[in-house]
């Protein structure tokens, strides 16, 4: 049985994985060099940074607790980026989706299981509405979705703050927060001595659902084709406007579900008074995962591990946690730079073509 010949597409896929890995290694080397320069105890700092998250169940639990919302955020951004729509509304969808879930948790009286499900569904619907707005403006008036979604995030923030202060506020709490969530609305804890909740199951299930949707359905194909070449997609009969809106609806829904899951799994009240930042983290994860849902959990775990490691290092040594920001920035710059390792890729493609030609001549 003959081996399947290596195609240019195969080489490009391998190259993208190698490029991300090399970017991560370079960023970590720079971070280690900085730690060695600024710290009086660099060995201990590096140890806490690299091994700290594994030193106890509680520490590793913190990694997985952060992993959950990062998966939702990464998936939401991946869907929109696959359509080449740089909608930053996942941040607002995450925020308002959590608010909607908190409202449903406090004000609805439902049995256990159903209550949490309804609250999460409410968060998903609200998140879908939030991200659809920039999509509609883009399709209708050709407005730049990046600008409109960024501005929308601040509208969402102040709208959510108003709802919390004047509709949901528990005056006896002593700080801006809703009334306590009933047990029927809370997501159960899965592992003792941690706050890892059942939302992690929903996150992993969504990874496979989103992957199957994007790569195994005609709607996912339409999203990917529109993202790769909008003119070709239109010529092929794809409704580009409808596809753009669909990608924003789905991405916003996933972000809203993520916000709802985070609120119901990690908090006893709704108390977000600022944007949580997960939507912007989703951009980092989508870049690392190359917009492929299957790689989102790996990217989310890597980022969560880095951040918890940096937090442990900052608490136990003399190195500030901002080191992680440097790592993130370098990774994004190197992965986003199209010419980074481009000569290597071109050389491999040429060598493969010459090899295939030689095989054909021999045959």
Image (tube, grey):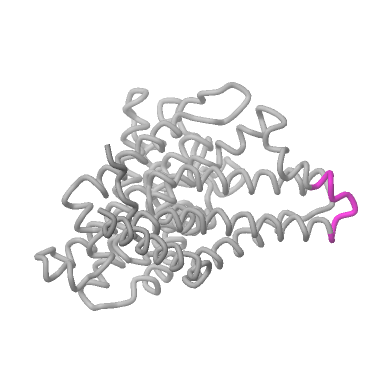
Q: Is residue 45 left or right of residue 166?
A: right
In this rendering, is residue 151 above or below 269? Answer: below
Q: Quadrant of the N terminus?
A: top left
Identify which residue, 345 or 317, lies in the foreground: 345
Indicate yes or no whether the magenta region holds residue 166. no
Question: Residue 281, can we see it?
Answer: no
Q: Residue at x 52, y 50 (%)?
A: 272
Q: Is residue 307 left or right of residue 356?
A: right
Residue 338: image location, x then y, percent = 47, 71
Q: Residue lying furthest left in this view?
A: 237
Tell me which segment is drawn in magenta: 37-45
Residue 155's image quarter? bottom left
Residue 267: image location, x then y, percent = 53, 37
Identify which residue, 102 or 208, lies in the foreground: 208
Q: Residue at x 55, y 23 (%)?
A: 191
In this rendering, is residue 324 above or below 187? Answer: below
Identify which residue, 60 or 191, lies in the foreground: 60
- Please tell me whether the stretch drawn in magenta is mainly helix, strand or loop: helix
Question: Residue 116, can we see it?
Answer: yes
Indicate yes or no whether the magenta region holds residue 43. yes
Q: Residue at x 78, y 47 (%)?
A: 46
Residue 34: image location, x then y, percent = 78, 60
In this rendering, is residue 24 above or below 137? Answer: above
Identify which residue, 307 or 337, lies in the foreground: 337
């Amino acid at each position: 049985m003959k081996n399947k010949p290596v195609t240019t597409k195969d080489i490009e896929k391998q190259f993208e994985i190698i490029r991300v890995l090399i970017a991560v290694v370079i960023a970590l080397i720079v971070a280690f060099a900085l730690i060695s320069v600024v710290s009086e105890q660099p060995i201990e700092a590096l140890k806490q940074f690299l091994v700290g998250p594994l030193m106890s169940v509680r520490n590793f639990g913190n990694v997985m607790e952060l992993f959950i919302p990062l998966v939702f955020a990464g998936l939401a951004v991946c869907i929109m980026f696959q359509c080449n729509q740089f909608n930053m509304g996942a941040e607002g969808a995450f925020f308002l989706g959590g608010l909607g879930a908190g409202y449903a948790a406090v004000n609805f009286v439902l049995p256990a299981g159903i209550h949490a499900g309804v609250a999460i569904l409410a968060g998903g619907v609200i998140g879908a509405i939030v991200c659809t707005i920039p999509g509609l403006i883009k399709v209708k008036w050709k407005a730049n979705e990046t600008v409109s979604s960024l501005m929308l995030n601040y509208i969402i923030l102040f709208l959510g703050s108003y709802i919390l202060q004047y509709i949901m506020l528990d005056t006896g709490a002593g700080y801006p927060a809703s009334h306590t969530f009933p047990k029927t609305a809370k997501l159960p804890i899965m592992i003792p001595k941690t706050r890892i909740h059942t939302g992690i199951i929903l996150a992993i299930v969504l990874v496979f659902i989103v992957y199957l949707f994007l790569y195994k359905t005609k709607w996912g194909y339409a999203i990917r084709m529109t993202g790769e070449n909008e003119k070709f997609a239109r010529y092929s009969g794809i409704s580009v406007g409808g596809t753009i809106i669909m990608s924003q609806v789905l991405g916003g829904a996933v972000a809203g579900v993520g916000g709802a899951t985070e609120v119901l799994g990690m908090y006893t009240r709704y108390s977000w008074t600022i944007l949580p930042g997960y939507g912007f983290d989703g951009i980092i994860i989508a870049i690392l995962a190359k917009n492929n849902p299957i790689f989102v959990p790996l990217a989310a775990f890597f980022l969560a591990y880095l951040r918890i490691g940096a937090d442990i290092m900052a608490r136990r040594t003399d190195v500030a946690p901002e080191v992680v920001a440097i790592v993130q920035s370098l990774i994004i710059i190197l992965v986003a730079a199209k010419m980074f390792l481009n000569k290597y890729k071109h050389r491999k493609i040429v060598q493969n073509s010459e090899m295939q030609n030689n095989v054909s001549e021999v045959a």
